[in-house]
Image (cartoon, grey):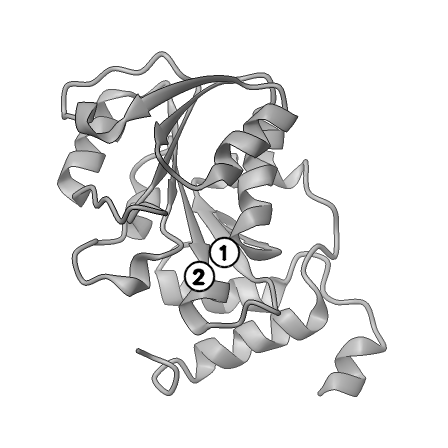
Amino acid sequence: MADGKTRHNPEPEADLLIEKLSRECNVDKDQVLVTNGATEAIYLIAQSYSRSDSGIFIPTFSEYEDACRIYKHNINYYNHDILNSNIQFDDDVVWICNPNNPDGTIIGDELLLKVINSNPDSLFVVDEAFIEYTNCVISLRDEVKNYSNLLIIRSMTKHYGIPGLRLGYILGAKEVIDYIKNYRMPWAVNGLAIEAGKFLLQNKEEFKF
């Protein structure tokens, strides 16, 4: 496998892995974007919406702030305890880590959906990189079919314990995924990572924890 996959360029968009992920997540193929780990997903989204107003719930993963600063976002900070079903945001993008890194704060799916539904002009980026490490959080990945203002970030790197093979993906509405694709370089994900991703999905029961 290594010989064949290192002597040729990988698929520019990781199409075969996207096909498998779309079946795994029960979404259309054009609602999936494979990335070089969840971190690339964060920076790619920040780049796509450069110079936006971004809301970040703190304390949280520092990469949201770092990515937003690089791409000239105006950042507003919020504490998790203000989140309620009636909250209104003026931000173009709202970043939420669920479950949260580093403190493990959990936001229920019903509350999140109410907030997303009542703020249609804000794009909600929900980072579910650590969702497999808890039984308390229900993924919103099925909801990308219903909400055009929702992006989900997932991490195969963390899910399967492969930090040396950077592999993540974004789920969202087709028009949003298409827009973000305009900002990403081809061959961002290497061939070995793509093959590993396909193998893990084909054998997911063996690697389930």
Extreme residue toward the top, this view? 90
Which residue is rendered at x = 48% and y = 78% of the image?
200
Mark 1 neighbour density, 10 Å: few (under 14) some (14–19) many (20 or more): some
Q: Which mark is residue 22?
A: 2
Establish if 61 lies above or below 90: below
Query: What amino acid does circle 1 point to?
Result: Lys
Residue at 56% across, 56% down = 37
- Name the residue rendered at 63%, 25% in the picture: 71
Q: Judge by depth and name the residue closer to the eye, 112 or 81.
A: 81
Query: Which label belongs to residue 29?
Result: 1
First in sequence: mark 2 vs mark 1? 2
- Callout 2 crowding tier (Cα within 10 Å): few <14, some 14–19, many ≥20: some
**Residue 197 x/y as whole percent:** 54, 72
Which part of the image, by quadrant, shows the N terminus? bottom right
Q: What's under tag 2, amino acid-wise?
A: Ser
| 7 with respect to 174 (left or right) | right
Q: Position of residue 123 (x, y in %)?
A: 40, 27
